[in-house]
Amino acid sequence: MDGRRRLFSLALVMVSAFVMTVPAPVSLEAAERTGLRVPVVLVHGFTAGGPRVWGDRSAEGRGLYGCLVRAGYVPGKTLFCSDYGDAPAADYTGLALVTLARVVSRALAASGADRVDIVTFGSGALVARYWVAAAGGGAAGGGSGARAPLRNLVMIAPPNHGLFQADLLKTLYHTDRLVRARARWGGPGPAPPLDPFPEPPAFAGEDDYVARRARDYERLYAEYLLVSRLLGKAAGGSGSASRGPPPGYEPWVAASRPDLVERYILSAQEPPDPPGAGLTLAYYELLSLRVGRWLYLSGAVAPLKPPSLPPVRDILDGALRRTVVDYLKRLVLDWGLAKAEKLLRREAAGVGLAVGELLTGLSAGSPGLGRYVPEHLSFPVLGSGRAGVPAGSAPARVLCNWFLGQWSRAEAASRPPDSRYVTIAGSCPNVLGFVGLAAGPNDLVVEVSSALTDPGPHDVFVRREGLSAVHRALPSSAAVTGLVVRALAGEAAGPALRPVGGAAEGEDFACLWRPEYRVLPEPAAGGPRGGAAVRTLEVRTMDPVWCGLEGLEVRAWVGVVEVGPDGTPLPGEVPAPVTFLEFGRDPGVASAPAGAPVSPGGPLTGRAELAPPPPGAALVLGVRLVPDPAAGPGYLTMARYLGLATEIPFSYTVTPGGPGDAATAVGGAGGEDGSEGGEDLVADAPGGPQEEEARAEPEDDRSHVPEGRPDEAPGGEPGQGTGSPAGSAGPPSGAEVEIVPTPEPPPLVNVIRVTKMTTRKRERRVYHARWEWDFGDGERWVDDDPRHTKVTVTHTYDIPGTYTVRAVSLANDGRLLRELSWTVEAGRDGPDGTGEGFSFTFEAETIVEPEVVLRLDGPVKWITGRPARFVLTAQVSRPPHTRRQVIRAYPGWSFDVVWEKPGRFEVRAAVTVRQSYEFPERRLTLWNTYVVVTEVEVFVPGLTE
Amino acid sequence: MTSMGGVSRRRAPLAALAVCLLAALGLGGWVALRAVLGGDQGQVLVVYVREENSTGLSALPSEVTEVSGLDLARGRLVLPAGAGPLPPGTRVLVLRETWVAGVLTRSRAVFVKRLPALVGPSEGEGPGAAAPGSGSALLAFDLLLDADGPGPGPRGSWPGGARITVEPQGLLMGPEGVAVGPVVLEPGQEWRLGAVREEGGVLVLSPDDPAYEDALRRAFYDGRPVSVLVVMNCGLWDTDRIENAGG
């Protein structure tokens, strides 16, 4: 048995290895369908020449080049490479305007086509997109010259919004340079802080600016160490002690130097004059802040070093490489021997080489490095909710690479409306996270979020995950080459166009990562073509906010696509948009009653008049989600949904007549005609419990509320009360409530033992337990009555002076809920606050646990073998300062239970309330679970009491 | 031969059945044993210990991690890499971190099943950590943890309240050499101690001492080592709030 099992495992491994290493074959049928009239141009990235990326340039080549040849592309006629050798590309703009433009001209001339497909790897995408932004380079452009002659752009691992390592490289470069220039090592301790913090120097070049500014931040870092970490004072200068882990350096700067952050970072998101490398002054300030920290740390090491100090570069490079290898070794221990050992053996050299390439291929001091600085970097801020800066301690996105944004806008204007971008990004274990980079999912070189672009109607985004989704391995991976070939053919990676003769109505789901298409039916037989055969297309969907998809909006359009003689859309063609639908609130649905805890939104309806399509073409409906421009940079909005479901239901109908004609019945959004489905919910209106019912909108069973949404407190540090001794603000308007529906049919619980529980959820509540007051004069007071969530405290001082008062609200499990502080001056004329001279009154407010009343309705006597239906209803109050509530029922709002044996059983149901609070200084989210139990007596059928 | 083959064929299914029954009994017994011993304890008491040292980086850190594994605001605790998962029967989880010049050099999780327990410091571990013998980790002492009151009960409960006592071992404070501790900490309470290196040795100070802040500030700007030890009783935590590194 053992031998057979081993043999089977070996065969499995061999088959898997074979499948993984042999490029996916492309059938003759696929070759015929690849739309060969459009030539393909391959553009590699910097630090890697064409053959290393695309493989041998022959039909037997194992890379993408060989795949395309086998798929029918002809080198020199429909297959071209834009090569610039192995030299690192310092400036992609020159490559776009010269090298790529020349190759595109050649490709158009040789193939006779009027546009090209381009496939890129790595920074080759920036070359291609810059070429698009320059409208095809002028001389190579066709048509009107205002649009690039582009059909498909397939980008493999593109750093569209910069490289996260570029920031690290710049930091290391400047640290190295300034440490070497330092006159002496060791000596007395750090320099004392500067008060006030100096103004930045006039900008006279990056090196000069960082050299002067980093020294200011070196002192600030010393102050952070002393004040925050050693003395344990809370940020904000109140002087009171903080509790728990102190904040990191940047959150401390944000809390204790908000003016510095506001003036020199948030208000400096523009390049100097002249713009130079196109980086903003805010970026140079952030760079100086980080270099200053490294300067301090370098000095902290130096006194222990022998007099002959080794070059700092060796320390930095060596430390980086050593860390990567150490991490891989840790993978061996943590992930299991076989998988991690394979990674270590196969990728260690590649990883090391990639890191080495980053450090040498694009040298840290090269001016071209600035082109790859991330477009945005995050920095924690204590915002006041002003435009673009969220309130609380959420991180702000600071524009760093102004140049990237500038030409990206030009690209949007010169990109053909029927072009399609297909992005393939890789996500593997984040080894480089241990080098101190706060990078999101990445392939060791490019962050997945950096690869995203604001989607055009037809754009597709694909993410490859796993140990093999490493940057260097992506272009030669069989899965990716197959994706590319199919994307060029308009298949698989691209949307599938349903055949002509589509139904006059239908429903489906749209998402963020690709469009959904439906070919619309032809006008009725006998109807005049090109005449007055007017039809109306109506599309119904839902406000994305109602599906938990904040920051997104629905986009739908009607396009035209060429069809072949048999009426099938031509391969590789995308429907050129003709009309975009405008969505409005469905007038047929009553709005929510005033005060009812349901979020704004609801069903949306868009209408468009359909004219008959031209001969040889068909009308196509396209629907997708796109980022809402009002929510900030599109790629950052999209990055929030990486790894999350983003599906939204839609339905459509095509009816004769214009939009103003009497409408026929249309299907509900994602539901059956005429049926409502959905779940009853009972919620309190503010002000007290009431028996008010609100019926939820029909929810499709595939709608999804993403967990762990990033709109919750990312600041993570106990905030500081900033108010005067007056009351805090009232509840914010627009608090949202989401009730997660139970999918249809309701869950069925089979009980075969007495102890089988319908839900394993246990009651768990977090609530305010006590206040701890410190009046700054040595007097303290603890109020441990949980009911005292809003208190007014008066304290009288005996001695004139300045006092810092601190109030801390603690939960029943010991966690910190709120930390407030005031500074008062006792005994002076015109004291702060409401007190007189020596007496002061302080008001403090903390969370109020929602009042939850559960009711579980169902039979009290039942029989075996037949499902019994139970319905759970909940009354959940909305406490003050509620920002959001997500309410979920277990096992469901309604569920069935079957008993297979007679007896007395407990039926339990639970409701979890994810309660988010918003206070002036912080946001807080708590999870509470409430349980309700009922008893049922079960009999065998035929036996009565 | 036929009859022998027939017998062996009959025995194989019976043997397999016996093995399955034994395995099922064993598994059931193990599950019962865990339930009795409180394997699914539900809650643990979390104690957070932090050593802050102003000097003593042995190398420029390649790991510039500056985020603690403990996030009180969100009620999350991420165990150090390689430390998890939480072993069954753990009553107290001690997260002990060592920071040097604002860089996290070592993070260690200690799983305590019985009290009293001795929790040792980290010594010269991790990249960039204070080099052994550098004289910069002034408060790297063993800590004796014990329950104050009845202590932990079954299944992670603390019927008498989740209070603990903390006592640094061998630590003397002040010129008279008064031993420090034990200190009683209620859930949510924090205890702090500071130390500076002076000419005559190490001076240990309490934050209640009026000279505390001034002594630390002078030593810091003189370039003399300063250390602070912070111990916090974070109260009872549901085990599902304690995550392994990497999710």
Image (spheres, coloured by chain):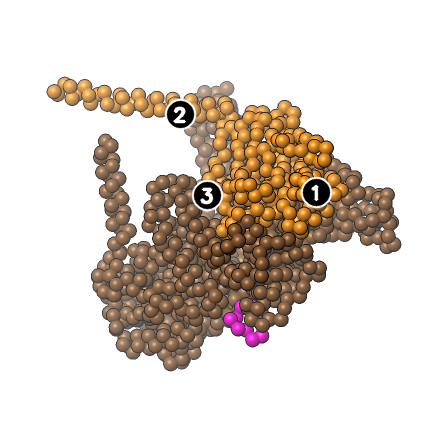
Chain colours: A brown, B orange
Determine whether label 1 and label 2 are within 8 Å by CB.
no
> Counting other residues with Cα less than 10 Å from the Cα at mark 1, is it few (<14), some (14-19), or many (20 or more)?
many
Residue A380 at x, y percent in the picture: 60, 55
What kind of residue is marked 1?
A: Val
Is B12 rendered above or below residue A230? Answer: above
Can you identify the residue that label 3 sits on?
A: A744
What residue sits right under mark 1 in the picture?
Answer: A808
- What amino acid is labelled 2 in the image? Leu
User: Element under label 3?
Assistant: loop
Specify start and end residues of the magenta stretch as a single range. Answer: A273-282
Q: Which residue is mark 2?
A: B27
- B115 magenta-colored: no
Look at discs 3 and 2 and give the one toward the viewer.
Answer: 2
Asked whether the residues under marks 1 and 3 belong to the same chain, the reply is: yes
* Disc 2 packing (10 Å; few <14; some 14–19; many ≥20): few
Quick one: SS at disc 1? Answer: strand
- Figure quadrant of residue A113: bottom left
Residue A178, image x, y percentages:
55, 62
SS at circle 2: helix
